[in-house]
Every structure is written in C-alpha cells, then in structure tokens.
Amino acid sequence: MRKRELLLRLVVRPSIISQQVLWQSGEADVNIYRCPLLTYTPGGNLLVVAEGRKGTGDGGLKFIATRRSSDGGFEWATESFIHDDSFGGMEDNLGAVLVDDVRKEIYIFYIICAHPDTCSSSEVPSLMYVKSKDDGISWKPAVNVTAIAGPKNFAPGPGYGIQKKLDPHKGRLIVCGHGGTLEVNGNFCLLSDDHGKTWRWGAEMLPIPAYTNNQDGDFVPDECQPIELPDGSIMLNTRNQYRFHCNCRMVSRSYDGMETIARETIGFDETLGGTKQYRHPYSVTSASYSSPIRLLKQPTLHLHCLPLTMYITGDLRGTNMMLRWSYDNGTTWSGQLPIWEYASGYSCLTAFPESAGFAKQKYLYLVFEKGKESYTDMIEFVRISIDGTL
C-alpha cells in the first residue's frame, strides 16, 4: 500500500455531526417532497433543491423549491421557488444541479411534460434550465434547451452535473440523464464548451434491445451520475433498471469528455445494490462525489451513498442508507457509515472542492429522502465529518 493511501486511510473516519429536516411532507398543502439535489455554491454556501408534489406520483401538479445556507448547513433560509406548476399542467420533474466555477454560475435542469399522457395538451416534453448569477439568490427566466440542442429529450439526473476540471475538454459542462419516460430509455449526456451559451448532445448508452418495451433481465441503463476521476476520464454510475446481470449498479467510463462511452469499460458494481430486490432498484440513485474531494493531494477519496437493502413492499422501497468510501476510484469499497436504518430513497452528496478554489475541507453534506414507514415522509440534511472530529 502506498504511503499516501495509508495516510488517507488513517484520516478517514466519517461520523455524523448534525442532522436537520428541511422539508416535511404533508405541510402547507404539499403531499410529499421528492428528489432532493444538493450543491456547494461558488460563494461558499449550500443550495438544496426539491420537488413539492400535490400528489404522490412522478406526474401531476408540483413545484420546484430551493433553500440556501450560508453557515455550512446549520441554519437554512426559508424556501423560495424556481418554478411553480402546482396549479397548471406542465408537470416539471427534477433534475440536475450544475456549478460553473469559472463563471460563478449555477444551473438547475428539469424537464416539463415528461409524462405526455397526463400533462396539458398544450405542452410537449422539453428539457429546461434556470440559471443564477448571484450564488443562488435569484434566477433568470427558464431556457428551453430542447430548442437549442435538438428534439432528442431526456430526464436529467437526478443528481448533479459536472464541470471538467482536467483535460481533455477542461471547463466543459456536462449533464447526464435517462430517457425512461420518453421515446427511448438509456443514458444521454448534454455538453457545453462555451459556458452554457450553446448545448449539444454527447455520449449515449442505449438499452438492449432498444426502441421497444423492455422487460426484467434486459440491459437498460437508467438514472445516472457522472463523476470526473483524477486522470480526467469520467465515470458514469448508473441505475440498472431491469437487473441485467445482477441486482447492482452499472458503471462505465468516457475518455473524451463524454463525447462517447467506451464500450469495453461497461461493467457492474455488485457491492452497490440491494441485498433483496423484488423488482427494479427504484431507490438506488447514485450520489457519488469523487474528485474534487481530496484530503491529501493524492489519492482521491471517492464516495457513494444509497440504501443497502431494497424492498418493493407497499411504500417501503429502501432501508439502511449507507455512505461508502473508496480509495481506488470505486474499484473496491473500503468502509461504510450507517446514515439511517429505516425507509430511505433518493440522495445527493456535495462538498466544497479544492479544485474550485476552496481551502481543504473536512465535511461532507448529504440530503436524502427518509421516514419510518415511508421514504417520502421528509427530506433531511446531514453534515458529516470526514475525520470524525467536530
């Protein structure tokens, strides 16, 4: 074992420092809150985004809400609203959050009319984003990316987009997602090399068979999370929708800034998956955060958070939310920290990265869906110390 890696293993002893409920389902005429996203901001604050749903399903009336913290997550401002469709028929769905560290801008991507059979007849599926130039305090009017990049569509995330910090294509903005509710499933990525002025389609990974009604056992990539690794390549960690090969996560790599996915790198991480799965892994959305979290200059600490045990019984779909960490870019997983033993669902991790100009940090930040009987009871924020100290 290399000396640097040994030192890192001695330092990494994660522990939960504080927890706080940010949204409680059933309050203020909101049935449930879903799909939380979390990011650092260029100004050193934290920003969390979530769907507020009038109903319970992915379709139907909802709004997109944000909350912001300027003290590392101890106190949070009251919620503000990015988009309110709680009385209309556009059906907005999150989503991915993306930080352009060069321009100091924040993007929130979402899709409208992802379920054409239930949204307003005047709407068509469209990928949208809003952008903030003042650290998430205010937001510019929504931009229709579909009109810029072309008619192909996808549901972004849920998770975060990335800005490449290393060559090739240093500075590129990348948002990946899936087409499961649209004309074809699979993974798709959207790219910008001019800080969001223009967007174009990049890598894709289609199901086998494609353009058909897939069934259990088919190869169907779904919700995904891109992560830049220390060599400048990008790992895509993907939900294995119909349990091809195993009840686990798909992993793949791109060596050209997500222009393409290298077919020979497509594989499976059998550590990341439910010990019991009666259908497909609804709750196993990636919440990985790799480079730029660096406690030492090398190697990089790679993290992942998801429920350990998967069930499809009533409304309980995931239990035993775990934070896992790796010293070899996710090839193996060296430890785990229990986060919540009962029902849990989607989650998102962030930190303040050195590669974005922040000083070395010792904290991770997590938001996730949790509850006792249902994972949609609330959305909670968790502050985690990497070395176990306050």
Image (cartoon, rainbow, N blue to C red):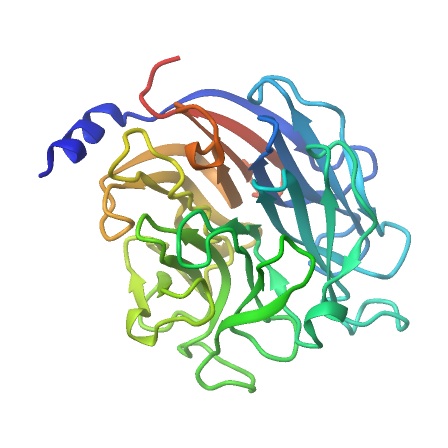
Question: Where residue 3 sits in the image (x, y, percent)?
Answer: 11, 32
Q: Residue at x 75, y 37 (%)?
A: 26
294, 125: nearer the viewer: 294
- Left or right position of 277 against 43: left
Residue 115 seen by the camera: no
385, 46: nearer the viewer: 46
280, 299: nearer the viewer: 299
Above or below for 91 versus 123: above
Question: Where residue 173 sits in the image (x, y, percent)?
Answer: 56, 54
Question: Where residue 143 sits in the image (x, y, percent)?
Answer: 78, 57
- Left or right position of 113 against 17: right
- Left or right position of 33 against 360: right
Q: Residue at x 57, y 56 (%)?
A: 157
Q: Residue at x 29, y 50 (%)?
A: 330
Quarter of the image for residue 236 reads bottom left
- Left or right position of 378 against 210: right
Quadrant, the N terminus: top left
- Residue furthest out toward the left: 1
Question: Where residue 178 sits in the image (x, y, percent)?
Answer: 56, 67
